[in-house]
Image (tube, helix red, strand yellow):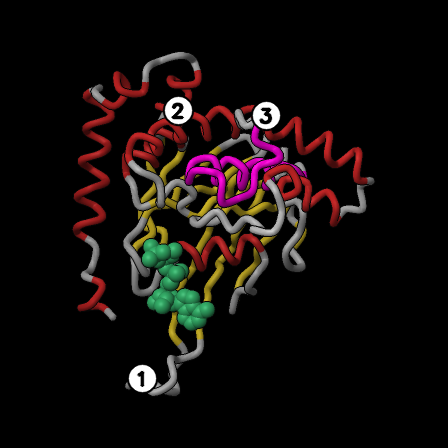
Amino acid sequence: MSILSFRDVSLRYPPRPGSRAAGNDRLVLDGINLQVASNELVAIIGRSGSGKTSLLNLAAGFIAPTSGTIAVDGVPIPGPGADRAVVFQDDALYPWLDARDNVAFPLKLKGMPRATRQARAQQLLELVGLGDAGDHHVWELSGGMRQRVGIARALAAEPRFLLLDEPLGALDALTRTRMQEFLLRIQARSGAGAVLITHSIDEALILASRVLVLSPHPGRLTAEIEAGFSAEILAGAATEKVKASPLFKRLHDGLTSLIHSLPNEEAAA
Ligand SMILES: Nc1ncnc2c1ncn2[C@@H]1O[C@H](COP(=O)(O)OP(=O)(O)OP(=O)(O)O)[C@@H](O)[C@H]1O
Ligand SMILES: [Mg+2]
């Protein structure tokens, strides 16, 4: 079991050129404390601009915090690493590679011989239900298929943590619902912990065992609720039935009013 932790993490970006606040750095995240274990899926919800992607970029090691520490098993992360894989909102696949080579790419970086990495990539494609699509070009795949290739690629390096930034945000409602169940099962099977950024309260409640609310200006984690619905779905309960339960509705309403009661983005900017 691994733990990804944020301790008293704050992040400032330099001021936008020409802004009235020129000279003042902008505090985007303030005092973030967070622990995610490698057997759980934690969702973070918050309004646009509250700092969700910034938080994920910190966890990935793409950017460094202004203060505080981000660590895996107590060891501060030095930057990006194969132990933390990112899935972006847009699939971010390499268009010049076919689906299988996209999945195999992290294995190439690891120096795995071509035949071995191709075989491993094929296994991963089968895991995400795309065993027949390995030779397809990226532009021949639907949005949902592309996201599945992106998830297979993220799993290729056997990360301890999956960092998911609105991975289903660009999909139509029907595909999104199907992909939510898919993501739930894949994450449970992979044994990797996951941080899921989402705008959707439904999605957060269905997929996560804990839902954290990031309030804006500056981004602070202001609420945490436990949700057991993912365990019910993994045990065979129908998602629609779970969503219709009084407890789901109560938590959904609670989170909705919490997010709407947060300070208005424009007013607080
Ligand atoms: N690289 C950067 N340099 C300067 N400012 C940035 C940078 N990235 C983000 N910001 C600013 O930080 C704030 C938080 O942005 P971030 O992208 O983390 O929000 P978000 O919650 O992911 O929003 P969304 O839901 O729209 O994706 C915004 O005001 C944004 O303009
Ligand atoms: Mg974002």
Q: CA distance from mark 3 to mark 2?
A: 26 Å
Q: Position of residue 49 (x, y in %)?
A: 32, 61
Cβ atoms under marks 3 and 2 closer than 8 Å:
no
Q: Residue at x 28, y 54 (%)?
A: 47
Q: Is residue 176 above or below residue 90?
A: above
Q: Residues within 10 Å of mark 2 (few under 14, many from 20)?
A: many
Residue where numbered disc 2 is placed: 230
Q: Which residues are magenta?
A: 132-157
Residue 52 in the figure: left or right of residue 149 = left
Residue where numbered disc 1 is placed: 19
**Residue with the most extreme top position:** 236
* Element carrying mark 1: loop
Q: Is residue 178 above or below residue 199?
A: above
* Element carrying mark 2: helix
Quadrant for ligand 2?
Answer: bottom left
Q: CA distance from mark 1 to mark 3?
A: 51 Å
Seen from the viewer's position, the closer of residues 8 and 216 is: 216
Q: Label 3 amino acid?
A: Gly
Cβ atoms under marks 1 and 3 closer than 8 Å:
no
Q: Residues within 10 Å of mark 3 (few under 14, many from 20)?
A: some
Seen from the viewer's position, the closer of residues 183 and 140 is: 140
Q: Residue at x 35, y 40 (%)?
A: 171
Instruction: Say if residue 19 shows up in the picture.
Output: yes
Q: Earlier in the sequence, mark 3 or mark 2?
A: 3
Q: Nearer the viewer, mark 3 or mark 2?
A: 3
**Residue 104 location, quadrant:** top right
Q: Label 2 amino acid?
A: Ser
Q: Is residue 124 above or below residue 50?
A: above
Q: Position of residue 58 (x, y in %)?
A: 52, 58
Residue behind label 1 places its C-beta within 8 angstroms of ligand 1? no
Residue where numbered disc 3 is placed: 131
